[in-house]
């Protein structure tokens, strides 16, 4: 029935919005009419109206505060994070004190990422569920602080049970204990590094790297998501630690390449699925350089506290049973492994204000410094875990098992503000040792290479791993070490390039043997059948990046371009991903091995992208030091 019958009583509130003429008249008429209606109401009706008005006002006030907070956070995210803000924010993301218990941090609800970032009122439908709000508030507070350049993390962080302490970046603080440093407020970096402002400004070669990355990522995403490594041929995965190794290793590369969507998706996985409470054996070195290093640099580049929170429990909570043991087949540890976790643990101490990480790692450095069995600064490859002494004495290499010992001597010295003399002295002595005992020149091209010494006998064998050395030498020269280091770096760079150039596929073997005899028509680089595989390793393109960045010579970019093309020709798998190959000398049958190592995304493609950039401030070498897995960590006292 329409219209409905009039109610017998009027004990309800009825609001009528009437378009009638008389109501559209003068204000006096309207005021009189309202007053008349108010007078007509019963006392109960008036009380109810007043009560509702008070409730509405309170609700409106609360909503305003909440919406303003959301809006500010959305604005700061979109403006500061995704508009490609400086990689090194004006204030280094504030170093913090560890949570009272790491478990407390680990136990925080994961954050649900906000997928849409835009200016304007927030769409409340995309808000994270209630359980995530604690972490989100903390992130927002931090982002706000970054945008306005505030020191330290806001009161929200403390309210949430985390008490943060600021740490300074003053040069004199570089080598002080992290706990002490952490009491200083952070200061803006004098020369902030910049992420390439906008993907549209990428040059053609950088775009090709982005394309390669997306292809590799597509394979990983489709067939190995959340697992350690992609097996691109069988479209499956392999597990090493069961910690999403490739995904974590690739985080900062995605950030640098401007791959927002992919980064966000990976972040989501880290937030929800990355758990360290597993009964699994992990290798200390590999998990430190890839996972801890990857999380710390993702934190530094994105400013997203989630990555730091994930890094802290990783370092503090024993994985699985917590039982440490040497490799199953020996009681020896590899020298490179125990001496290449220091950059990461030192940085973790600086960020948390907890010295235990740094102290544990530096104790190893001190012990190794004092050990017998070195030869002019060169170290043997093994340390016995029971005796603490070098074993397999008399064998010296810059390749597998020793390589990053040398790299981390220099890089720790740089990280700490170039004040730790012991590190520098050990590094300089080692470079002299290399010159004295390990250098030779090949025939016919007279390539300078780094061989090995076995109980006094020289071997003309050089691992591809040694190709990190040109970059490290160049970096040292850039930081004030002798000019001859740069000369040696350039000579070795030529050699590493020839290890690619002289192969039929244009890709280097895992191990090269250099020809020392003056015979015509022989290549300098010889390969044994067991060594002719290529694992998509980064060391040569890593050094090309340093050499180009520090000399400006474009030939290094051209060499890197040739290498990328060879990777695309011989290792790219059509259905997604790239694969190691077994034979770099057979272009018709390179024999893909069905494995894409995480460092291809974490290191190789990142260094190629940086190599093709002409912007020296894109992760400036005066602001960042790259760990041995290419994860940039801040120099404590940037010059
Ligand atoms: C990486 O994990 C690191 O670069 C490490 O220092 C050596 N091996 C691989 C890449 O080849």
Image (cartoon, rainbow, N blue to C red):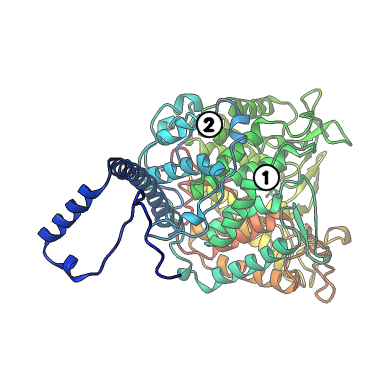
Residue 110 sits above or below residue 233 on the image: above
Residue 423: tell me if it is visible: yes
Q: Tell me what residue is drawn at x 71 percent, y 26 percent.
A: 371
Q: Quadrant of residue 498?
A: bottom right
Which corner quadrant holds the C terminus? Answer: top left
Residue 48 pos. (x, y %): 33, 42
Residue 343 sits above or below residue 621 on the image: above
463 or 268: nearer the eye? 268
Count every numbered label the image shows and give the total: 2
Residue 503 sits above or below residue 276 on the image: below
Residue furthest bottom as drawn? 588
Q: Tell me what residue is drawn at x 53 percent, y 66 percent.
A: 612
Residue 44 pos. (x, y %): 31, 41
Q: Tell me what residue is drawn at x 64 percent, y 51 percent.
A: 269
Give the side of residue 16 with respect to residue 271, left or right. Answer: left
Callout 2: few (<14), some (14-19), or many (20+) C-alpha neighbours within 10 Å? many
| Circle 1 residue | 274
Tag 1's secondary structure? loop
Residue 227 pos. (x, y %): 75, 52
Would the CB of label 1 be found within 8 Å of ligand 1?
Answer: no
Residue furthest front as drawn? 8
Q: Tell me what residue is drawn at x 67 percent, y 28 percent.
A: 364
| Circle 2 residue | 352
């Amino acid at each position: 029935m329409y219209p409905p019958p009039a109610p017998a009583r009027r004990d309800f509130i009825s609001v009528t919005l009437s378009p009638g003429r008389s109501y559209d008249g003068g204000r006096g008429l309207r005021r009189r009419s309202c007053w008349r209606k108010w007078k007509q109401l019963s006392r109960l009706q008036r009380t109810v109206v007043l009560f509702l008005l008070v409730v509405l006002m309170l609700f409106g006030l609360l909503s305003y505060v909440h919406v303003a907070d959301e809006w500010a956070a959305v604005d700061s995210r979109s403006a500061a994070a995704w508009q490609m803000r400086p990689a090194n924010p004006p204030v280094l993301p504030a170093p913090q004190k560890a949570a009272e218990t790491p478990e407390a941090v680990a136990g925080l609800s994961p954050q649900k990422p906000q997928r849409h970032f835009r200016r304007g009122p927030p769409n409340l439908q995309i808000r994270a569920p209630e359980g995530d709000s604690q972490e989100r508030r903390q992130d927002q507070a931090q982002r706000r602080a970054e945008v306005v350049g505030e020191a330290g993390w806001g009161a929200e962080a403390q309210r949430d049970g985390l008490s943060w302490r600021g740490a300074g970046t003053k040069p004199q603080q570089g080598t002080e204990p992290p706990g002490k440093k952490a009491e200083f407020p952070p200061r803006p970096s004098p020369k902030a590094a910049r992420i390439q402002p906008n993907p549209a400004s990428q040059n053609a070669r950088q775009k090709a790297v982005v394309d390669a990355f997306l292809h590799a990522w597509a394979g990983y995403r489709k067939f190995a998501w959340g697992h350690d490594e992609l097996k691109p041929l069988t479209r499956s995965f392999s597990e090493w630690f069961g910690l999403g190794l490739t995904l974590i290793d690739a985080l900062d590369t995605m950030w640098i390449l401007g791959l927002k969507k992919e980064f966000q998706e990976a972040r989501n996985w880290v937030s929800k699925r990355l758990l360290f409470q597993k009964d699994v054996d992990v290798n200390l070195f590999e998990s430190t350089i890839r996972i801890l290093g990857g999380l710390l640099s993702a934190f530094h580049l994105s400013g997203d506290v989630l990555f730091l929170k994930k890094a802290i429990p990783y370092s503090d909570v024993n994985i699985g049973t917590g039982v440490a043991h040497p490799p199953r087949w020996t009681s020896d540890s590899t020298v490179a492994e125990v001496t290449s976790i220091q950059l990461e643990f030192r940085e973790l101490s600086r960020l948390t204000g907890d010295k235990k990480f740094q102290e544990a790692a530096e104790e190893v450095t001190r012990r190794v410094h004092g050990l017998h069995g070195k030869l002019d600064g060169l170290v043997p490859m093994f340390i016995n875990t029971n005796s603490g002494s070098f074993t397999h004495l008399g064998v010296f290499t810059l390749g597998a098992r020793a390589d990053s010992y040398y790299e981390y001597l220099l890089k720790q010295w740089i990280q700490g503000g170039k004040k730790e003399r012991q590190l520098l002295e050990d590094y300089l002595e080692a470079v002299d040792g290399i010159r004295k005992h390990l250098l030779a020149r090949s025939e016919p091209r007279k390539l300078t290479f780094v061989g090995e010494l076995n109980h006094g006998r020289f071997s003309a064998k050089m691992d591809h791993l040694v190709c990190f050395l040109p970059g490290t030498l160049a970096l040292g020269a850039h930081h004030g070490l002798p000019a001859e280091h740069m000369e040696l770096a350039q000579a070795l760079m030529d050699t590493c390039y020839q290890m690619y150039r002289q192969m039929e596929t244009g890709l280097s073997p895992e191990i090269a043997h250099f020809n020392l005899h003056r015979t015509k028509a022989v290549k300098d680089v010889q390969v044994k059948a067991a060594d002719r595989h290529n694992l998509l390793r980064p060391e040569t393109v890593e050094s090309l990046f340093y050499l180009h960045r520090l000399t400006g010579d474009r030939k290094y970019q051209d060499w890197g371009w040739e290498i990328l093309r060879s990777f695309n020709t011989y290792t790219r798998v059509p259905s997604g991903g790239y694969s190691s190959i077994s034979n770099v000398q057979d272009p018709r049958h390179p024999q893909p091995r069905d494995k894409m190592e995480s460092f291809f995304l974490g290191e190789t493609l990142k260094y190629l992208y940086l190599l093709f950039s002409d912007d020296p401030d894109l992760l400036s070498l005066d602001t960042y030091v790259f760990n041995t897995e290419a994860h940039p960590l801040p120099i404590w006292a940037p010059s």
